[in-house]
Image: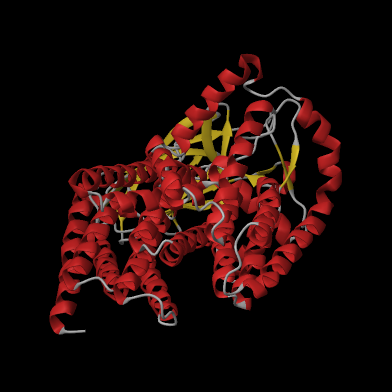
């Protein structure tokens, strides 16, 4: 790499470092807001966040800490801690102590109910470990609880953050992101611009909700380093392919890089709040303790117990055994598989549609439609993982028929099994899709060069379905005990008839997928399939997938069953929408304008959902 190219990356780093310094100057008082969920970047040794009525809080332990970084080394620190002290009648109120880096700076006796405890002390360094120490009592489940912490407000020395480490880590992150873009094959100026743009977004995030005083800048640096490693690995793997031109490899690697940075950067941001993340982590703990058949209880009256299959937890367990936090491990796994699924759509489009641009646009639709971020924000990790592995299994299934290699057939079997055992809804969807795919391959698709080897993929899928069926036998009693009541209960749309249910479903699809993506997919289906419904394994799978989605749509209207077919059909929507948008770019000025407007709209929708998920949703 020439000196000028290195200099451009360094300039990107210096520019972002300057932006980080500005972010530090914008930082004011520190507010660790537990009530609204803006606290995860700062808390240590607290119990998980809970709710009583409309109020959220964290129970402290005997010693719990609020950890701050990037403080100015000298000057007064003023603190206001809002606590709620709850003790049973006749039990003495607890003694409270507040410490700064293990030195006691304030003692008092807790006051009953909600109160603000204020004190001040001199700052002695750039890092502060503010301790809240309380006498505890034993609650249900063997937990020892101190006091309920609602918020902590701190006026730091000088009224703003110390910029040194912010600038260092964010500047280095921007330089690494520029390097990742160069490894992906982007030109020097494009790579530097990518580093500045992405680094600038992280500088903006640092300026929000007191993150300038957290360790988030270091996490951004680590994310950038992981991006370089991931893109380098992707580049090494793509060197084995002989069908891709250099320009096409650049497209694949660019999709890999940007989708990973955006999605991992969003979900790993301390401002992101996943509704059911702790619930998923608890199911992971159950699995690691030996329970291969966990379940969850719905909010129906009376509630249902539903299966919670474990393939996501099995894949995540090694990271937890290596010492990774359970929620962070789950988030890392689902984002990584989600990103790889997007790359698989790019490669599949290149192979069967002969259009790498269609693949890149398919990946954009896959990642940018609202449901992509809404599912992550809701903590619906198992379904996200199921859809990702379904996408990978579908791509491997088509590749197995085209190439006839045992590795693709084996991959189709493995990914189909993992998908089926990830989410109970995927058992209903995949249990229909996979047999229809295999059946159409043998009965409807004309023989190809690898027709004699089709039995391999059929055997692999058959083994996967059989293994999934054996696994779900462990849930047989749970399902049979509630099946009749599930079918007999009244659906949400029953009172208004089919018309009312149709309106609900269309409104939901508009919210979750959006009309732009749906209309583009419908137009793409008419273009791609037309008279080629079963001309190849790819076209047959799409045709069957569309028919299955229509069947589940009708089932949703006519029965009380709740099947998330709209999410599970996302890969086919993305592929068809990408194909249509790509073809529109070749249809003159109006076509380019319309396609460009659609791409811009989808991109803005994806960014809007990411920002809303970080700043507002579930807060």
Q: Which residue lies most toward the left here?
A: 4
Image quarter in which the N terminus is found: bottom left
Which residue is found at the position 52% from the left and 23% from the top?
503
| Colour convention | secondary structure
Look at the picture and state if 342 lies above or below 149.
Answer: below
Look at the picture and state if 242 lies above or below 465.
Answer: below
Quadrant assignment, res 456: bottom right
In this view, the residue in front, 192 or 121, is 192
Q: Can residue 518 be seen by looking at this rendering? A: yes
In this view, the residue in front, 275 or 348, is 348
Look at the picture and state if 53 lies above or below 263.
Answer: above
Which residue is found at the position 63% from the left and 77% from the top?
406
Rendering coords of residue 573 (x, y %)? 47, 47
Rendering coords of residue 116 (x, y %)? 43, 33
Which residue is found at the position 52% from the left and 61% from the top?
337
Rendering coords of residue 59 (x, y %)? 57, 42
In this view, the residue in front, 615 or 183, is 183
Q: Which residue lies most toward the top here?
A: 495
Is residue 404 toward the left or the right of residue 580 in the image?
right
Q: How many marks?
A: 0
Look at the picture and state if 448 lies above or below 573.
Answer: below
Is residue 136 toward the left or the right of residue 594 in the image?
right
Q: Can residue 40 be seen by looking at this rendering? A: no
Rendering coords of residue 187 (x, y %)? 20, 72
Image quarter in which the C terminus is found: top left
């Amino acid at each position: 790499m020439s000196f000028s190219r290195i200099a451009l990356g360094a300039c990107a780093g210096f520019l972002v470092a300057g932006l980080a310094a500005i972010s530090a100057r914008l930082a004011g008082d520190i507010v660790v807001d537990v009530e609204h969920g803006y606290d995860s970047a700062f808390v240590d040794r607290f119990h998980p966040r809970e709710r009583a009525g409309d109020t959220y809080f964290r129970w402290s332990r005997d010693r719990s800490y609020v950890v701050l970084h990037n403080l100015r080394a000298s000057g007064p620190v003023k603190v206001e801690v809002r606590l709620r002290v709850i003790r049973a009648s006749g039990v003495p109120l607890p003694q409270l102590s507040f410490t700064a880096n293990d030195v006691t700076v304030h003692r008092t006796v807790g006051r009953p109910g909600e109160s603000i405890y204020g004190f001040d002390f001199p700052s002695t360094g750039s890092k502060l470990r503010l301790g809240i120490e309380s006498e505890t009592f034993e609650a249900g489940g063997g937990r020892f609880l101190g006091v309920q912490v609602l918020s902590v407000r701190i006026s730091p020395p000088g009224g703003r953050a110390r910029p040194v480490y912010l600038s260092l880590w964010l500047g280095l992150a921007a330089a690494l992101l520029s390097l990742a873009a160069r490894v992906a094959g982007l030109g020097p100026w494009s790579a530097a611009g990518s580093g500045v743009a992405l680094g600038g977004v992280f500088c903006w995030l640092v300026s929000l909700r007191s993150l300038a005083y957290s360790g988030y800048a270091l996490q951004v640096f680590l994310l950038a380093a992981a991006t370089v490693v991931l893109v380098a690995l992707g580049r090494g793997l793509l060197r084995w392919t002989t069908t891709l031109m250099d320009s096409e490899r650049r497209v694949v690697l660019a999709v890999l890089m940007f989708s990973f940075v955006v999605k991992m950067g969003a979900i790993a941001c301390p401002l992101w709040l996943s509704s059911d993340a702790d619930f998923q982590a608890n199911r992971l703990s159950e699995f690691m303790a030996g329970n291969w058949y966990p379940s969850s209880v719905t909010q129906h009256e009376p509630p249902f117990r539903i299966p919670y299959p474990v393939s996501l937890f099995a894949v995540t367990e090694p990271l937890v055994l290596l010492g990774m936090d359970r929620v962070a491990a789950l988030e890392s796994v689902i984002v990584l598989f989600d990103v790889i699924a997007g790359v698989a759509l790019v490669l599949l489009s290149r192979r069967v549609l002969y259009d790498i641009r269609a693949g890149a646009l398919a990946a954009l639709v896959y990642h940018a439609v609202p449901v992509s971020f809404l599912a992550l924000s809701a903590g619906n990790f198992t379904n996200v993982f199921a859809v990702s592995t379904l996408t990978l299994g579908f791509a491997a299934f088509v590749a197995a028929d085209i190439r006839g290699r045992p590795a693709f057939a084996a991959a189709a079997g493995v990914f189909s099994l993992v998908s089926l055992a990830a989410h109970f809804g995927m058992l209903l969807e995949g249990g229909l899709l996979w047999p229809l795919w295999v059946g159409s391959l043998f009965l409807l698709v004309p023989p190809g060069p690898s027709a004699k080897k089709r039995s391999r993929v059929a055997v692999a899928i058959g083994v996967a379905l059989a293994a999934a069926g054996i696994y779900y036998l462990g849930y047989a009693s749970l399902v049979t005990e509630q099946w009749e009541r599930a079918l007999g209960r009244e659906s949400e749309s029953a009172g208004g008839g089919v018309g009312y249910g149709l309106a609900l479903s269309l409104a939901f699809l508009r919210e979750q997928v959006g009309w732009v993506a749906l209309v583009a997919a419908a137009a793409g289906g008419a273009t791609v399939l037309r008279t080629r419904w079963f001309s190849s394994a790819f076209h047959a799978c799409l045709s069957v997938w569309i028919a299955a989605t229509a069947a589940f749509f009708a089932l949703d209207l006519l029965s009380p069953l709740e099947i998330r077919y709209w999410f599970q059909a996302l890969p086919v929507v993305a592929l068809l929408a990408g194909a249509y948008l790509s073809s529109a770019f070749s249809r003159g000025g109006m076509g380019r304008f319309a396609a460009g407007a659609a791409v811009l709209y989808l991109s803005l929708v994806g960014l809007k959902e990411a920002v809303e998920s970080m700043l507002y949703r579930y807060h």
